[in-house]
Amino acid sequence: MIQPPTLLLVEDDPIFLDRLGRALASRDWEIHKARSASTALAMARKQKPAGAVVDLRLPDSDGLDLVRDLLRLCPGLPLVVLTGFGSIATAMDAVRLGARDYLTKPADPEQILAALRGDRILMGNPKEVPTAVPSLDRVEWEHIQRTLADTGGNISQAARLLRIDRRTLQRKLGKHPPRC
């Protein structure tokens, strides 16, 4: 009997981790689940995975640091960064570090597997990552979105954290996101 390839899933949300693990296991992968960077590194040392899916936000480490550590431990490991807090800057950082792709949640299991295979590259050739810096408007919009997500959508609390008037924040949220 042929052993299925192992996939390391690193996600701090237990419900999402369980659902994604079951979905990928049904597609002939042996799933190893970790809810922290330290657990993921221990698992990767013990059994070299054939691929990894890493959440950007972890309780004990930044997901980008884990990407760096996993690729140091397992050079050439097909690795995808998965996050609910997508931004151009972190996507570029992830690809520069060696991640094969960068997906935002909710990501379909087929999208994840395509990214692991390299069928779907975020920015064309991963070796040709653009060096353009996002515009100030785009960075501000992404920061507002992250702060709003961190407060569970509470506009008043987000406005306090951002140190702007609640009505100003509402106006900014009413605008379309800047393209670059």
Image: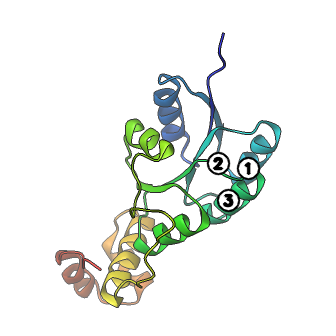
The colour scheme of the drawn protein is rainbow
Callout 1 touching callout 3 (CB < 8 Å): no
* Residue drawn at 39 percent across, 50 percent down: 120
Mark 3 in CB contact with mark 2 (< 8 angstroms): no
Picture coordinates of residue 71, whole percent (x, y): 69, 56
Q: Nearer the viewer, mark 3 or mark 2?
A: 2
Q: Earlier in the sequence, mark 3 or mark 2?
A: 3
Element assignment for label 2:
loop
Question: Which mark's residue is nearer the viewer, 1 or 3?
Answer: 1
| Mark 1 residue element | loop
Q: Amino acid at mark 3?
A: Leu
As drawn, the label of residue 82 is none
Picture residue at 56% right of the left edge, 27% below the top: 29
> Residue 25 at x, y = what percent?
53, 25
Q: Amino acid at mark 2?
A: Leu
**Quadrant of the image for the C terminus?**
bottom left
Residue at which label 2 appears: 77
Label 3 sits on residue: 66
The CA span between labels 3 and 2 is: 13 Å
CB atoms of marks 2 and 1 within 8 Å: yes
Residue under label 1, please give it.
Answer: 74
Viewer-nearest residue: 2 or 52: 2
